[in-house]
Image: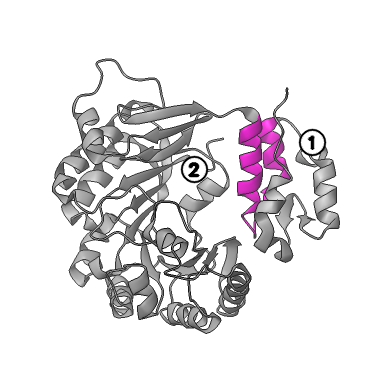
Amino acid sequence: MDGQFGWSLYLHIPFCATRCTYCAFNTYTDRHALLDEYVRALCAEIASFGALNRSIHTIYLGGGTPSLLRPFQLEQIISHVLINFTYSPILEITQELNPRDATEEYLHAIRKYVSRISLGMQSVNSSELQMFSRDHEHSHVIQAMKYARQAGFDNINLDLIYGTPSQALDMWRDSLQAALDLDPDHLSAYALSLENGTELKRRVTYKELPLPDPDLAADMYELASEMMEKAGFIQYEISNWAKPGKECLHNIQYWKNLPYLGMGAGAHGYVNQTRTVNVMKPEIYIERLKNPPPNPLPFPQTPATMTSEPIDRQTDMFETIFTGLRLLNEGLSLTAFEQRYGEKLDIKFADEIKRLTRLGLLWQDGDALKLTKSARLISNRVFQEFAIEEEA
């Protein structure tokens, strides 16, 4: 279950200059003074895994806004990882960046440690960027792409959001075209989710903004698929497109339901059939790593662990199915499923597979079970067909 090259690491940086109106992540805009202490605590949590001698093949710095890290802080973090883990020769290190932070100087400095960057473009439309409370304009994205190429980055992702209040199909087409014009290596397009506790959810609830139209969002998704395919991108996952060979290895680890360690305040991890969640507040996170318990906690817990939940076989099986089916190009391997669980997928779920195939939602391509094109818009309904009822 270790994957071809081993585990993945997710490192959470929970600080932002401003909070986006759609964001429900564990982030803080008023605690930048903690950044130095936070980096030291993160390094201590990384070191707590040092005795494992495990191999990793991806590192992902997410947030929050990891581009608030100064280059020397980034070097501290990456150095601690490389000292405490063995790693693949094709180690993928991704950092999320706010386009405004991606200056020429910064990009040249981080290129020593980072192999892949992800820029939060979100939209080309100024009114949408204002609605999201983004602190950048599209000119910052253009400049960031230019500087990133000059710094030697050859694996760049752009994030886009669709299905937003008042967004017309032409506005979405403009954002897609603007992104494609920048010639990225990877594109992620996410349908807006109105999360509880977010400013955007509040504004829609109180009718300050219209409720997004799900039928229009479906049209936007299909438009994205058409435009990106025409531009030479492969849709390898429901929300992700890449040029050949530029797929995000870190995200594929998630979609194959393979192990990853989550470190940092509020980070989630999944390893040894156990899901972990760290304490949320940076102050508490820092304090726990400063004053760890005298005896080491059982793996995969660290002093920062808030909850540690064993994942039963049925839950794990269901999660492997629905994450695997999200990989549109590769699909869910019947052989890998049998190797992992000692059961044949096409026998255990024979009725479900037959029914979904008859409905034109699934098809078998050699050793792989895959979603059909018509199933992509209703994929969650397909996944639910495989939900295993708990035995009485």
Report whether 147 appears left or right of 191.
left
Residue 71: x percent and y percent? Answer: 19, 56
Instruction: Report the residue that reaches farthest toward the front.
Output: 206
- Identify the residue at horizontal 26%, vertical 56% (top origin): 16
For discs 1 and 2, the disc positioned in front in the rendered view: 1
Q: Amino acid at mark 2?
A: Phe
From where the camera sits, is residue 291 visible?
yes
Query: Magenta region, mostly helix, strand or loop?
Result: helix
Image: 191 above or below 282:
below
Image quadrant in which the N terminus is located: top right
Residue 48: x percent and y percent? Answer: 30, 29
- Identify the residue at horizontal 30%, vertical 70% (top origin): 148
Mark 1 / mark 2, whichever is N-terminal: 2
- Residue 104, image quadrant: bottom left
Report whether 173 appears left or right of 376.
left
Mark 2 Cα shell of 10 Å, populated few (<14), some (14-19), many (≥20): some
Determine the secondary structure under disc 2. Answer: loop
Discs 1, 2 touching: Cβ within 8 Å: no
Rendered image: mark on residue 5: 2
Image: 326 above or below 54:
below
Q: Amino acid at mark 1?
A: Lys
For the image, the number of numbered tags is 2
Instruction: Report the residue that reaches farthest toward the top.
Output: 295
Report whether 360 appears left or right of 290.
right
Residue corresponding to mark 1 = 348
Image: 7 above or below 144:
above
The stretch of residues the image draws in magenta is 314-341
